[in-house]
Image: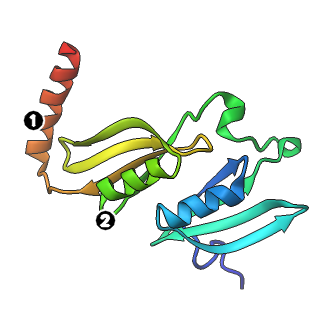
Amino acid sequence: MVNPIPDDYPRISVSMSIDGAADAIAFYTEILGFTERMRIDMGGKIGHSELQLGDSLIMVADEFPEMEFHSPKHYGGSPMQLSLYVEDVDATYAAALAAGATEVRPIMDQFYGDRSGMIEDPWGHRWNLATHIEEVDPEEMARRSEAAMAEMGEG
């Protein structure tokens, strides 16, 4: 009997349309630490690829407008972000910027125990990069969250 959820696949994964998928795959493997586990070429374009990081999987392909598979640039930007925990957010963030990403939000220590910042990769996808730096219990999280919301209201 065939397993309805294939082995080695998470229950949910993102499929990213990229104008220039081969370059994006190089960026994601070299800068963000993914491993390419599959690539299907289709007429000079990448029809499908799978990149793995730990137990996470993203699927990357070139744009196929004829199939309504467009990159974020087609829509004027991305309405979502990908969140990625890394060992050293400062080093990964700096490497991403040096490789052509743009800063969306600078790296800061967050009230919930992460040090994080956001970049937009050269293909229009947004990545929240983070390193967990502190365990915060629920009561302290609530107190810090309230303080952070009050501070935003003042700004």
Mark identifier at residue 87: 2
Q: How many marks?
A: 2
CB under 8 Å between discs 2 and 1: no
Q: Can you give x and y, in whole percent of width and height, for residue 69 in the image?
A: 77, 44
Can you see residue 11?
no
Is 38 positioned to the left or the right of 81 in the image?
A: right
Residue at the extreme front of the image, as rendered: 98
Mark identifier at residue 117: none
Q: Amino acid at mark 1?
A: Arg
Sooner in the amino-acid sequence: mark 2 or mark 1:
2
Residue at numbered disc 1: 143
Q: What residue appears at the point 82 percent right and 67 percent down from the top-left corner?
A: 41
Of circles 2 and 1, the one toward us is 2
Q: Amino acid at mark 2?
A: Glu
Name the image quarter holding the N terminus.
bottom right
Residue at the extreme bottom of the image, as rendered: 1
In the image shown, does 70 or 73 lie closer to the viewer? 73
For the residues marked 2 and 1, what is the alpha-carbon distance in whole angstroms? 27 Å
Q: Can you give x and y, in whole percent of width and height, for residue 80 in the image?
A: 52, 38
